[in-house]
Image (cartoon, rainbow, N blue to C red):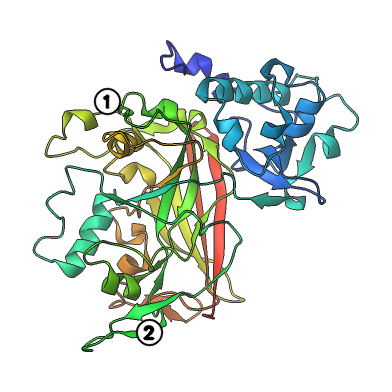
Amino acid sequence: MYLCFINLETMISANNPDLTSWVEVPENSHFPIQNLPFGIFKHEGEAPRVGVAIGDHIVDLYMLNLNGFLDAFDLPVSIVQSESLNNLIKLGKEKTRMLRNRISELLSAGNTEIASLPDVYGKYLLPMNQAEMLLPVEIGDYTDFYSSEVHATNVGKMFRPDNPLLPNWKHIPVGYHGRSSSIVISGTDFHRPKGQLMPPDATAPVFGATQRMDFELEMAFITCEGKALGNSISVKEAEEYIFGMVVFNDWSARDIQKWEYVPLGPFLAKNFASSVSPWVVTLDALEPFRTAGPVQEPEVLDYLKTEKNKNIDINLEVYLQPEGGKEYRICRSNYKHMYWNMNQQLAHQTVNGCNVRAGDMYASGTISAPAEDGYGSMLELTWGGKNPMQLPDGSERKFLLDGDSIIMTAWSEKDGIRVGFGEVRSKILPAL
């Protein structure tokens, strides 16, 4: 794997802010030519294929490859006609970087290779609203971190007012292994989960549907094929093993969680559903939005030390839509507030020799900003239900109701270029 680039900006020509496309891109679109995220789509009953988003269209990589426009990459059909991006990701960062550059070249203003073809629309470019988006990767393993200091402090204050952060929190990126089989694509609704609950002042648990349904605003990164079992990935190498990112909603049943989390942590409170956005924005596309993260005190151990600007400036918003009603924004946060960055998370995950594979997913943990309207969960926004949220339609929420939809969206913006993720949305259905 190619791990040392003399000039990363030169290697990633697709990021050029001066590029424009012959494909019409609406103003404020999340998918300008500087983005070109990858996803898996279906169209008119055909087999799932790899696509790239630009504006309101999907570029069909299967058709580009079939007709010779990607011949330099010698791509077998199994990579571009597939139910997941896993085989594409296994090509490695150098090759997927070159592929994104080539797609950028084909879509750039002045390039006529496909732009001049009479059947370009309908054959190579398809309307996004006519496609069905699928889960972008086959997720073998899933880790959820707990890396926002604001969130960890808020939650700690509710349960341990005098000692909100546990002793290890500023020394290691805390995380747990979650359930990958229940991670679902945006638009997949789910039923309110059930489990054991311990009602206030009760002496024994009861069984029932959660009364404290919550969302968690998160981002997740997806890895490339890692090293063999027994080897670790350093903080300096980490970015060459990270393919891209998605928006991640870690649905949580807070009352089930409160009863079960001691002594081993989340279980039924987390494994019923997690929702992700369909387009994987490459780490390459996010390079222009690098920024400094919070100062880490006390100093971390050597294997976790990173250089400056390893965080990413990604705007985050959460909307709540009651059944049949309007969407109301209830949270504005930013990924740059993460205390532990991706490099540190992946280095810690593998420091003991744990192997990672293409398509593995690593969620950030709830991303809360310092201001109260930046809290990334209902647990924080209503302070455990003690301060109900008043919605403009006159209703209130302590936690989420059946019929409520949560919509999350994320984008980076700099010098007039917006690189976004689209959205992830799901509705809560009544318990079965």
Residue projecting furthest to the right = 118
In the image, 173 versus 124, the foreground residue is 173
- The quadrant of the image that shows the C terminus is bottom right
**Count of numbered circles on the image:** 2
The residue at 31%/45% (across/down) is 337
In the image, 83 versus 210, the foreground residue is 83
Residue 345 rendering spot, x and y as whole percentages = 31, 39
Residue 364 rendering spot, x and y as whole percentages = 37, 48
The residue at 46%/36% (across/down) is 357
Tag 1 secondary structure: loop
Query: Measured along the vertical axis of the image, is residue 383 above or below residue 110?
Result: below
Specify whether residue 35 is in view: no
Residue 84 rendering spot, x and y as whole percentages = 62, 42
Residue projecting furthest to the left = 162
Query: Measured along the vertical axis of the image, is residue 218 above or below residue 193?
Result: above
Alpha carbon of mark 2 to alpha carbon of mark 1: how far?
49 Å
Q: Could you classify mark 2 by the number of other residues whose Cα lies within 10 Å: few (under 14), some (14-19), or many (20 or more)?
A: few
* Side of 250 where 191 appears, left or right: right
In the rendered structure, find residue 207 and report the number of the disc placed on it. Answer: 2
Give the residue type that dot 1 points to: Glu
The residue at 38%/84% (across/down) is 207
Q: Are marks 2 and 1 in contact (CB under 8 Å)?
A: no
Mark 1 lies on residue: 307
